[in-house]
Structures are given as structure tokens and as C-alpha cells.
Amino acid sequence: MTREQGLLKAYIRSRKAKEDSEETFEEAKRHFHVCESELIRYLEDHNATSTAKYKDLGKVTLPEERLYAHCPAEYSDCLKDFLVEKGREDLIKGTVHHGTLTSFVKELILKGEKVPEYISTYFKKTLKHYK
């Protein structure tokens, strides 16, 4: 086998392994979200904010819902202008990171200020695991 054939064979094998890993990862994410949703529903059905603490498992708590904010790419210039107007151009690093945007929007809401209509917000329940 030539070096070229060996490299091509290694490339094809590694691409297949990558694709298989991505499929496995996507399946694991779906399974995780199902399990998370079921545990959240269980805690809510039992008016609980936490599971019991178990040896070797720890516990999970159901903290308050987390705020998430999103600005579609087509409004990025509007967002940048808005941030400059608010004196927060320090948040712009080429683009505005989603976590930074969420924190900024949370600040606006807490101050009672209006969030532009091109920024969507939603709340999501998540679990926090303690070992």
C-alpha cells in the first residue's frame, strides 16, 4: 500500500468514526433531555424543589427558571446600535455572545427597561446536580 493509499484509508476511517460519534452524541443529547424533562415533571408533580440526597448519586435541585435571550443574525446591526446607544459597546466582540446578550437583557428587565422586539426571550427549567 502506498503512503497516499494509507492516508486516504485513514481519512475515510476517521471520517466514519467522526460521523458515528456525532450520531451517538445526538442520541445521547436526546436521551438526556428526555430524562431531564421526566425528572423535572416528577419534582413538579410532587411540589418538590429537590430530590433527596443519595449516596453515590448526590441530588438535583430545580432552581428558578433561567432566562435566555436571542437576537437573529439579520438584526445584529440593530443590536450593536442599541448597545452603543445604551453605552454598552464593551459587549460587542465582533458579535455579541449569547450569554452576554442574556445577561444584558436580564439587566434591562430588572431595571424595568424595554427590550427591543427583535430580541426574543424565553425561560427554561434546568436541573442542578450536586454530588
Image (cartoon, rainbow, N blue to C red):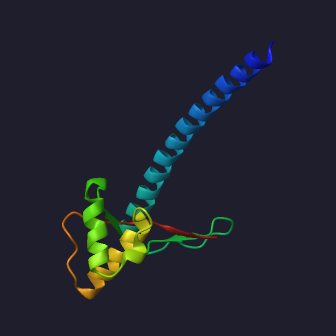
Residue 126 percent across, percent down from the top left? 43, 65
Q: Does 2 sit left or right of 117 as displayed?
A: right
Residue 82 percent across, percent down from the top left? 26, 73
Residue that appears at 37% across and 68% down:
44
Can see residue 18?
yes
Looking at this view, name the residue that lies furthest to the top: 1
Residue that appears at 41% across and 73% down:
91
Residue nearer the viewer, 82 or 130: 82
Q: Quadrant of the C terminus?
A: bottom right
Q: Does 130 sit left or right of 121 as displayed?
A: right
Can see residue 48?
no
Residue that appears at 21% across and 70% down:
116
Residue 15 percent across, percent down from the top left? 62, 29
Residue nearer the viewer, 89 or 114: 89
Q: Quadrant of residue 98?
A: bottom left
Q: Quadrant of residue 102?
A: bottom left
Residue that appears at 72% across and 25% down:
10
Looking at this view, name the residue that lies furthest to the bottom: 111
Give above or below for 112 relative to 5.
below
Give above or below for 31 relative to 103.
above
Give above or below for 8 relative to 43.
above
Q: Quadrant of the N terminus?
A: top right
Q: Quadrant of residue 94?
A: bottom left
Residue 63 percent across, percent down from the top left? 43, 75
Count of residue discs: 0
Residue nearer the viewer, 6 or 62: 6
Q: Does 86 sit left or right of 10 as displayed?
A: left
